[in-house]
Amino acid sequence: MKNTALTDIHISLGAKMVPFAGYNMPVQYEGINAEHLTVRTGVGVFDVSHMGEFILKGEKALDLIQKVTSNDASKLVDGKVQYSCLPNETGGIVDDLLVYRIDEKTYMLVVNASNTEKDWNWISKYNNYGVEMKDISDRTSLLAVQGPKATEVLQKLTETDLSSMEYYSFKKGTFAGIENVLISATGYTGAGGFEIYVDNAHAQHIWDAIFIAGTDAGIKPIGLGARDTLRLEMGFCLYGNDIDDTTSPLEAGLGWITKFTKDFVNSDKLAEQKKNGVERKLVGFEMIERGIPRHDYEIVDAEGNTIGKVTSGTQSPSLQKAVGMGYVKTAFSTPGTEVFIKIRNASVKACVVKLPFYKA
């Protein structure tokens, strides 16, 4: 099992450590609910150094990215980030990812930890463009500093004007005395904030500096447990749960990152699917009756017929109600539709709702 550059710090802080995507990762420190609310109301720091980072460089770097991703990366300018996915050849998703345009010939792709090797092999398979590919995952640390107080805390550590940075943009600059740090106005929580990419050698220095700067703001370390509840409240997909090799981006509500203005892997079949409509859709639902929906629970109609299954579910710390996401037959996907979740052989009433669950 791999460690991040900060594993010893997490252990010293009393974190509950668990294996995740081949890494020894902190799932919680003081408790998921408390950590969740810290991010929603203040500021918290996640070590997400297990994520994968690839540099693609060359005259035809954009051509390769356009071929393997569903979104239109030609719309990117220097300093901008794009959410996208890697479609497979059978209608599913290899992974979802972020595309960073460093300059006209240089891009950084940020992929899910559990898919790093798979994604590398997939992109390499289509690299007939002579693009130089470099996997910098093992030498890169990534800290997500999230919450409404993130800007005021981080601004103490850099001359880069953070408050003027637009969502899904990034800048490189000096941060906590370290040069060439990539500061990205992105995150997976819906609470605002930034993600900091830095060489492993500087990870502990950056971590310590952020916590000193955030003392007055009540900054706390946050584990992967709260990261999951925060993203679920926003209706953000988690690879392996809500999207995978068998789910189409159109079924998953990711039509907005699937652009048919270009040719990409499996674009013809996905365009056909868009034209004909999908048989199932990923929806959000709130529990009306008491019960917590869990991954793989059946979703049924009033007569008990199976109409789908739960992909993610939890008791929302912000909303104090149980919420979930799952695929259902398209006829049951309209907000307001009554459905039932099978919990211990009982059909527990729920209602399809429009995402996100949490609105700031």
Image (cartoon, rainbow, N blue to C red):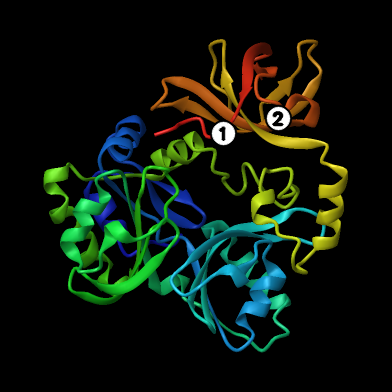
Quarter holding the C terminus is: top left
In the foreground, 168 or 238: 168
In the foreground, 114 or 262: 262
In the foreground, 78 or 55: 78
The residue sitting at 53% across, 25% down in the picture is 323
* Residue 160 coordinates in the image, percent (x, y): 25, 68
Q: Quadrant of residue 209?
A: bottom left
Q: Amino acid at mark 1?
A: Leu
* Residue 245 coordinates in the image, percent (x, y): 72, 52
Give the mark toward the camera: 2 or 1. 1
Q: What residue is disc 1 on?
A: 355
The residue sitting at 61% across, 89% down in the picture is 59
* Residue 255 coordinates in the image, percent (x, y): 69, 49
- 3 with respect to 267 (left or right): left
Q: For mark 2, does the 10 Å Cα neighbourhood hold few (<14), some (14 to 19), or many (20 or more) residues?
A: many
Q: Is residue 127 above or below residue 231?
A: below
The residue sitting at 43% across, 38% down in the picture is 230
Q: Is residue 125 above or below residue 111?
A: below
Q: Secondary structure at mark 2?
A: strand
Number of marks in the rendered image: 2
Q: Secondary structure at mark 1?
A: loop
Residue 230 seen in the current view: yes
Question: For the residues marked 2 and 1, what is the alpha-carbon distance in whole angstroms?
Answer: 17 Å
Q: Amino acid at mark 2?
A: Lys
Residue 208 seen in the current view: no
The residue sitting at 78% across, 13% down in the picture is 304
Q: Quadrant of residue 173?
A: bottom left
* Residue 220 coordinates in the image, percent (x, y): 23, 44
Q: What residue is disc 2 on?
A: 309
- Which label's residue is closer to the chain start, 2 or 1? 2
